[in-house]
Amino acid sequence: MGKTITEKILEQHLVEGKSERGSDISIKIDQTLTQDATGTMAYLQFEAIGIPYIQTELSVSYVDHNTLQTDFKNPDDHRYLQSIAAKYGLYFSRPGNGICHQLHLERFARPGKTLLGSDSHTPTGGGVGMIAIGAGGLDVAAAMAGEAFYLKMPKVVNIHLTGKLPDFVSAKDVILEVLRRIGVKGAVNKVLEYTGPGIKTLSVPERGTITNMGTETGATTSIFPSDEITKDFLIAQERGEQWVLLEADDDAVYDETIEINLSELVPLVATPHSPGNVKTVKEVEGLKVDQVCIGSCTNSTLRDLKISANILKGKTISEYTVLTISPGSRQVVDHMIKSGEMSYLIEAGARILENACGPCIGMGLAPKSDAVTLRTFNRNFLGRSGTKSAQAYLVSPETAVVSAISGKITDPRTFGALPKIDMPKKFMVNDNMIIPPMEGKESIEIVRGPNIKPLPEFNPLPDKLEGEVLLKVEDDITTDHIMPAGAKILPLRSNIPEISKFVFNLVDPTFPDRSLEKQGGFIVGGDNYGQGSSREHAAIAPKYLGLKAVIVKSFARIHLANLVNFGIVPLTFENKEDYIKVEQGDKFQIDLTTIESGKVALKNLTKGMEIQLTHSLSETELKVLKAGGKLPFIKQKHVN
Ligand code: MIC
Ligand code: SF4
């Protein structure tokens, strides 16, 4: 029987388990990446594991999230990360160099390899035919220490592309079409694998846009084949020798197939406040736009900036609209400057920002009150822009710039002829802002600023959990709800006591105090709890406040793993209808002695009823939970 690309790579990297859909497996990780907002915690954990040198083929520490330096905290963290990289043998990408996923695709992603990144958009690497997975920082720290990565053998969905994108319709519209069809929980424990003649019309950066935002479907990852187009991209990045051919067999068996004819696609938009609320641009056309932001790891490639610049050439943006550009990397900027195209952006009135995440994560350039903000980004969750009353819409660069000119949401196909852009045969490669692993590492001292607080320690799991339902929430709660980001909170990522004061800040700001006062308790939620970011702070900080278990209809993959990693019990209602039988303030008693059987009884003492709970935890995950989390679990292993 033929194999999918996903199976080929996973089987080559299999450490434990069987290559059967749904079974628990572990795989060897070749490469890791971290960014600064998750990296500080990941490296504190790596230090705690106590391994003298990284065990991966390649690990890179990027700085791209916390680049707004309003005080000492972020620059102190950057120094810490640089000293860690030097001591433990990592590449260090300096602040200003660009966004981790864009840079990794340009400089390090390799077909056929596995990559684990402490950022949910790590699947961008799937654009060159690698299995690139987002995970919590502790899982990445463990991978750097040589531990295998545990996951469920995913189902593989064939996204079969035919045709060719019409003018003014681009890669972003492809992934928005996927989201329109399957929604934000349509691909949990699945890999989206792209096949068909249509893929030959998509360059690697365009493929990267699609695999990047595949994260918003809940997918474990997304992947394209490694073909001649991949080869040309790697040659253009002076990495031609790293190319290998990697395609699915003709008789590969997929669990599902989604047919997309690229020729039939139209400009699409994700409306507030979910990437899954997809409409055609035509449906929302005419809405006045206050802010347009081009950038983020989804759409900040040279292709995206070139098309934006050439549409804007000789025009001026609307007097009511602010336009920001945050380029993906220095390579992109270098090309734009040398070709003269950067001037088109500047002359049109764009505000050029740093090569970093920037407004995507509310790090500056928050929109005005009640603003309509049109973004080429991948997430439009409530409040993420930094302004709670703002309405964020996600679109392609083409729709974004045409709308910036008109000052209202505009179907870009009304613009006229699509300007032609020339892509270089060779990229301007300059790695002088990536510091390679150094010699003489033993003598290197780790530099810690006062904002870096030691890791909190947690106890092994007891047999019985007792407490109150501290919060009851709906479906699709994101990690941005649980542990918000933005310019004020992100600098506290290496300080758990401080950051925990902001848990559920947008939902119920009384949560941290109530939780501490009651000595912890439970959260009850709906479907897809914890979707979005990989930030393990959405588990560590609530754990610090005393959270014992989360009981929901269903979980998003990365958050579920993060809960286990920090000893919070993730349970689901056996019967989803039981969700309505529980209220905030109810007193619970949960008996964990039967957890190995897959079932757990919940006594609702307030309502005087028993509710059956269940879970999907593997044997290893149960052991991790019992040890009180992954760090004590790994330490135990190294001692034994
Ligand atoms: C995001 O886009 O939400 C982030 C910020 O990149 C996160 C990581 C983090 O919270 O640090 C992600 O996507 O994993
Ligand atoms: Fe950065 Fe935004 Fe990409 Fe997250 S989604 S890595 S914040 S650019």
Image (cartoon, rainbow, N blue to C red):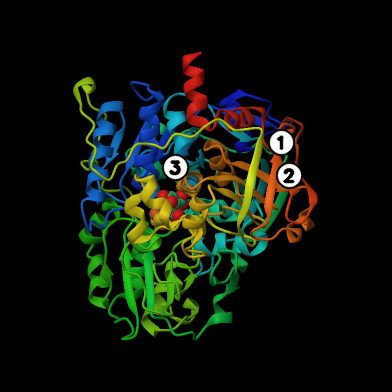
Quarter occupied by residue 270: bottom right
At label 2, which amino acid type do we have? Answer: Asp
Look at 46% across and 67% down and name the residue there.
Answer: 396
Which residue was labeled with disc 2? Answer: 255
Q: CA distance from mark 2 to mark 3?
A: 28 Å
In this picture, is 404 found above or below 463? below
CA neighbours of label 2 inside 10 A, class few (<14), some (14 to 19), many (20+): few
Q: Are marks 2 and 3 in contact (CB under 8 Å)?
A: no
Residue identified by numbered label 3: 118
**Horizontal placement of 259 versus 63: left or right?**
right
Residue drawn at (46%, 29%) of the image: 142
Label 3 CB less than 8 angstroms from ligand 1: yes
Are the residues tagged 1 and 2 within 8 Å (C-beta)? yes
| Nearer to me, 280 or 437 | 437
Badge 3 marks a residue whose secondary structure is loop
Mark 2: which secondary structure? loop
Question: Image height check: is 131 above or below 297?
Answer: above
Outermost residue toward the top?
640
- Say if residue 436 shows up in the picture: no
